[in-house]
Amino acid sequence: MVDYQLRQREYLLEISRAMTSSLDLPSVLRMIIQYAVEMLRGQAGFIALRQEDGSFRVQASYGLHSGALPFFAPLLTGIPPWTDPVGWMIPDLETRLSMVAATLGLGLRQVVALPMVMQGELIGVIYVFRSRGGAFSANDRQVLASFADQAAIAVHNARLYQQVMEEKRLLSAIIENSADGIMILDRHCRIRVFNRALVKLTGWPAEEAIGQPCYRVLALRDRQGKDICRTRCPLMQPEGRLYVEGDIQRDGKAIAVGISYSPLYDDEGRLVSIIANVRDITAFREAEEMKSTFISIISHELKSPVALIKGYADTLRREDAHWDEKTLRESLDVIVEESDRLNQLIDNLLDASRLQAGALKLEFSYLRIDKLAEKEVEKFRTQSKEHLFAVDFPPDLPLVRGDSERLRQVLDNLLSNAIKYSPQGGLIKVGGWADEDWVYVYVSDEGIGIPKEEQERIFERFYRAESALTPRTRGAGLGLYLCKAVVEAHGGKIWVESEPGKGAKFIFKLPRV
Ligand code: ADP
């Protein structure tokens, strides 16, 4: 008996060792059923676990061919719930076994089945079968009960582990796929988790960033280039908001980000880790800047023509004064010119907002761009006395497919710029040529020109070159933005060739028919 108990203890010890090692649940259950059968001097046995739908399924067996297992299904029905621990038993088990044994030609005669219970719930049943010897004794049942307990713990642990792993996977997936940059720092501010959005934002590969202190990876700077991480890290200041804005550098470019930190503490109030949420706020900043530029330009651009119109109109209507014909004409000319300017500004504004909303519609037809240009030049010739105009197109310029009104608007903007930005006068030339694929049109002047570094930016919305910021050359910085949009909507391209002080040549190309 002592020997028997010793063996039982050894088996149980081995099982608990297996459970704490990295063995998987099926292997642990197999081990349990094998030892249980051996201890009870049985021939076979299995462990059936309760499924989500309430049915039971054999999960581990010993001494039985796997092909035989489905035949034991009748033993897995009629299992009562764990409501009456004292009277719990599966009815008619021996009869059912004898039928199964007869079908399979096995000599199994006795069966004992004990519940596996965890937190007051039946989670499985352990069965042991015997072909020889007497019925299972109370002692046998007690021995088996200890194995059933071990099996229940193993299943419970495995389920908990699975649950934790699933939650971890879910959390990792959420962090990894979040549109915001997320990193998790340990309490020394070393990076432990670095998600995909942050890899994209910072250009740091995750495997390189992990393990680094966060200030090395982010290296936040303020607008003046001062290191925020070292001087103003919100984590160093226990009081106040855990939020900071600054620029991170990627490929030599500054990206504005806003970072909020959430510290996590353990039950004793010790800092365990910090979750940092990093958001790209470049677009937000740009929109803010754009808004203020927009307001200042528009208010200025609207105000000056209105002031001029009102000034001249007020003067003309004075009852005590008589104006000669010349003054009258000149004043009215100013009023008309300024009204035209206002009108153009409003048109440009409307077009720009249509463009932004993606609602700029083109009406295509086949047209001769050289004829369109000649007509436009004629219109401008009468407007400026200081400038000389020339038109230079080859006689056989191919047709282009385009929206004549929109292309007229492009030429209009380029010509009025040519006049505006060559205040001392000079030659303004419009011409073109064609190659196999494209029809080219240019508008050149001999004015102030544009420095290289601004030649791309002048096509941006509201952008005005430094040299243009004089009281004489007014503008909202919308003309070229619209030109670019219209030309590109035709499948073409627009650019400028210029040197400061040596005039500018704007060229656009459209696909030839
Ligand atoms: P606006 O003329 O209203 O300022 P545009 O979009 O038409 O706006 O032009 C943007 C900027 O490009 C101008 O402010 C000016 O700095 C520059 N620019 C445009 N055309 C010329 C030109 N012909 N010569 C020199 N600078 C030009």
Image (cartoon, helix red, strand yellow):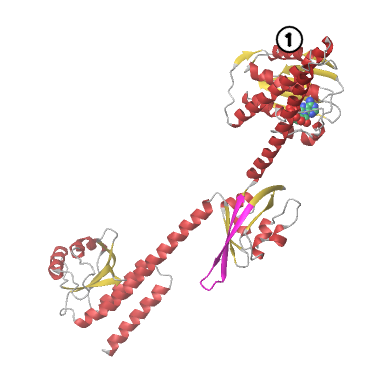
Q: Crowding near pointer 1: few (<14 within 10 Å), some, many (20+)? A: few
- Residue lying farthest bottom? 2
- Is residue 496 in view? no
Q: Which residue is mark 1?
A: 395
Quadrant into which the N terminus falls: bottom left
Q: Secondary structure at mark 1?
A: loop
Does any portion of residue 448 appear in the rendered image? yes
What range is drawn magenta here? Answer: 258-279
Furthest residue in direction front, as rendered: 320
Where is residue 366 drawn, in percent x and y? Answer: 62, 13
> To which quarter of the image does residue 275 belong?
bottom right
Specify the quadrant of the image occupied by residue 241.
bottom right
Question: In the image, what residue occupies the spot 69% across and 35% down?
Answer: 294
Q: Is residue 105 above or below residue 408?
A: below
Which residue type carries mark 1?
Pro
User: Is residue 461 rendered to the left or right of residue 265?
Assistant: right
Residue 387 locus on image (x, y percent):
84, 17
Q: Quadrant of the C terminus?
A: top right
Nearer to me, 136 or 159: 159
